[in-house]
Image: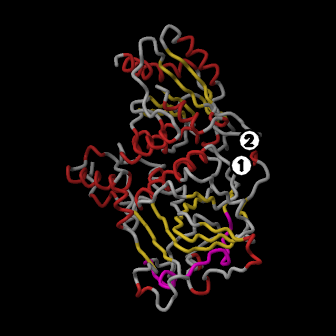
Amino acid sequence: MVVLGVSSLLVRVRDVRLAAWSDTSVMTAQQQQQLAELCYKQRDLGLFDEIRASQRQFCGHDVLSDWNGQDPAASTEVNVYNVAGGVKATVFRNLELNLVNVGIAQPISDISQDGGDHDPRFVFTDKIVHCQCQPFATSKHGSRFSPNAWAVWEAILTDVDTRVDPRSTVCDSAHARLQSGPEHGDRLVEFTHPVIVIARRDDHNPFFQISSTLNAWFMAQALGWDLQQTQVVYLDAGYPSPVDALRQKLLAPNHDIVTGQSLMGKRVHFQGNVMIAPEEGSGPMMQHLNDAEPCHASQLFKQFREVALTTMRVPPSKPVPLDGEAVVITVITRRPYKGRTVQRVWVNEDEVLDKMRDEYKHMNVVFQSVDFVDLTIAQQMHATANSDIVIGMHGAGMVNVLWTRPETLVIEIFPKRRRRWGYRNLCQFVGCDWHEFRGGTDIGYFWTRANAKDKEIPYDEWRTFFDPLFQARYRAIKSR
């Protein structure tokens, strides 16, 4: 086998993204050290220093040469952060958004219509963003596609494309703050506290919503923000989510979340710092979803797990089991809800669970099938953190493996041809023992997408796979 050079760690040199090693056992000691350093910088606590080091400031009040005759009091300070590993954020000071006539990209009238065709984000027009920082508006970011490719708003608002229209920066004098007058008093919302702006694309999907929460949290940590002072603003017309409670208590414990619906038809002025947080499809949770993730144990993820659980008053660890305490096996079930049909259903789940209960009835085991859809985020966290074994079909609810304790056995059931590794990656980061099951029979027409197929599993086949893993975990727990 050819030994890969360290440059093969980079998928794109410009982005410095980690690549998957085909076989880490053939790496030299130097390559292993270089990989460890990259993992620390892109998936771990080293990310904080990387964020701070990446800062580029425009129109800062202490940089007089930036003003070029602009009035500092009327200008907008802009700080741009761009870090390898998919982290991009911008912090403005003195920014205004005109949402008077804002449109929704792909609205729905009922939660049952939620899915891939729903996009609750607001539609970009050149009338929305108002700020004044000429050096930022005219700066070049080294892109061959556009003179202004900072990509501040691309993932936050829809229909933005700096490759053909550089107006997404819109921080020149033509887009300075709108003039305020008494006749607009009821249509002007002022924020004086630091604000974290989040735009949800997959508002119903906890995997993406946990990702955006993690992104906002580590950005605030890296920049030294006092989360007792911050507010969270949704720049979308999405539906409520259980993750909202975690976001509010973690990122803005002293303020309610401000919804995008409440701001539609109004002008919004952020007097102080406002962070355009890294979007939900970016950041450390969103790397290597389709191939091998080369990074493993991450203090960043472990710290986030502990802080999030503690914030929601869920014990991060489980006491050493007393004599007679049962081993808890939790099945994360997927069923239709609120009129919405779901994919990847384990159709004979109840039958298999009944047979497992009978099979292991002489052992001290408790089986529970849990549908997370109707649970609060705290209840989801508690159910997962309290489990010794977690089983579930591939789906967004499996993001709860993030809350598992180290060495928790996790079994993810896949349609045979579906390959997506987000939950495997989370287990690598926090220490759960992840395994995949692809057996049984996929149910669906031959033209049905692999990701959409349900699953039926003969019990004998399931037992052959599950029993050795279960017995090993059971012995380990009882020997403590």
Identified at 34% across, 60% down, the residue is 49
Neighbor class of circle 1 (other Cα within 10 Å; few <14, some 14-19, many 20+) is many
Secondary structure type for disc 1 = loop
Comparing 245 with 384, the one in front is 245
In terms of image quadrants, where is residue 167? bottom right
Determine which residue is flagged by label 2: 340
Q: Are marks 1 and 2 in contact (CB under 8 Å)?
A: yes
What percent of the width, then of the height, locates residue 252?
55, 53
Which circle's residue, 1 or 2, is located before the other in the chain?
Answer: 1
Residue 295 vertical position relative to residue 349 in the rendered view, above or below: below
Left or right of residue 296, residue 225 in this image: right
**Left or right: where 397 falls relative to 466:** right
- Residue 223 in percent (x, y) is at 42, 62
Give the residues drawn in magenta, as a range. 122-142
Q: Hey, what amino acid is under mark 1? A: Asp
What element does badge 2 sit on?
Answer: loop
Type of amino acid at the residue the image marks with label 2: Arg
Nearer to me, 12 or 77: 77
Disc 1 designates what residue? 114
Write the residue at 26% across / 57% down: 5
